[in-house]
Amino acid sequence: MENYTFNSFVLQMEGINVTKDLLYTIFFLLLTFYIVTMILNVGFLILTVIDKNLHQPMYLLFCNLTVSDIVGSSQIFPRMLSDLLKPPSERLIGYYECVIQAFVNQWFSSTSHTVLMVMAFDRYVAICYSLRYSAIMNNSMVMKLSLSAWAVPLIFVVVLIGLSVRLNRCRTLVSNPYCDNASLFKLSCDSVVINNIYGLFYTAVLLGSSVGCILLTYGKIVVVCFTSKNKSLNRKAFKTCSTHLVVYLIMFFSGFTAIALHRFPQYSDYRKITSLLFFVVPGSLNSIIYGVQSKEVRSFLSKIFISNRNK
């Protein structure tokens, strides 16, 4: 029979359950992914600041994604790595700390979608209105798009977490490697019908808007490319849009799989893995993908390499 502890302010993290033989292998693997993610994303931010050639809307908007990856990973991995080295009974977290982690996790995960949506709009303007691109995507527009990408998810997430915080808690085990909204309302023995309805609405709006924006902008880009005889424009469209699309698909499938598996408790181990992949895979690959395709980034790094070699 399940033991209930009502409204406890001390919770136990289930974390990742691994055998002693694999413990340190998994620990150093996750630590390596975290360090690589931090180096790549912080490096891209610094590079964007110091290289004036990267002061373009595409890269400035992408910096929002790097910030999201940095904060999203930092509020999960350090604590999770610490818990990994502790026995399950000592993996404790305060309730309000768990709420804050869930809030930040949901907000920054959602922002990844909205940032990629505004980046899709940027690519649409660059390809379909190339002659007016500088006038449309000025500093004011970039600032407005960036603020919108952060503010809109914030409103939805405040309501989402608020609905979970209002519930009475009768359990203390967080059945996840980190706190998220689903983990919070699963602590309750109250009815969570409203939470499930709003959660599905929130997910449908976020993913529907995200997919719809990508399909609409890329559909118009494809039409312009097919009707245009400008080979230079078509090459530019393929280069920049394919990069953005790869980043979007990686983020979309990683996030969607983790959300879907929350509905199937029998696959909890797979859910834990996929929820970590949402932070590990996009966070470590985004900067690499954009850095490799960017002529400006390659040129800057080449100058540094050549200057160091000549010393």
Image: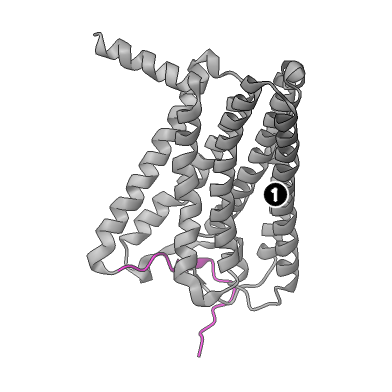
Q: Where the C terminus falls, by quadrant?
A: top left
Asked if 147 appears above or below 16 in the picture, the reply is above
Q: Position of residue 219 (x, y in %)?
A: 73, 40
Q: Is residue 275 visible?
A: yes
Asked if 231 appears above or below 150 in the picture, the reply is above
Residue range highlighted in magenta: 1-18
How packed mark 1 is, by other alpha carbons closer than 10 Å (few <14, some 14-19, many 20 or more), is: some
Asked if 92 appears above or below 73 in the picture, the reply is below
Q: Nearer the viewer, residue 44 or 210?
A: 210
Asked if residue 210 is among those painted magenta in the image, a careful observer would answer no
SS at mark 1 in the image: helix
Q: Residue furthest top?
A: 311
Q: Nearer the viewer, residue 167 or 225?
A: 225
Count the numbered circles shown. 1
Q: Position of residue 159 (x, y in %)?
A: 73, 56
Colour scheme in the image?
one colour
Asked if residue 6 is among those painted magenta in the image, a careful observer would answer yes
Report the side of 108 relative to 138 (left or right).
Answer: left
Amino acid type of disc 1? Val
Q: Position of residue 210 (x, y in %)?
A: 70, 47
Q: Residue at x 63, y 68 (%)?
A: 185
Q: Residue at x 71, y 32 (%)?
A: 226
Q: Position of residue 149 (x, y in %)?
A: 69, 38
Q: Residue at x 70, y 26 (%)?
A: 127
Q: Residue furthest bottom?
A: 1
User: Which residue bears the numbered disc 1?
Assistant: 211
Q: Residue at x 57, y 36 (%)?
A: 242
Q: Main secondary structure of the magenta part?
A: loop
Q: Quadrant of residue 309?
A: top left
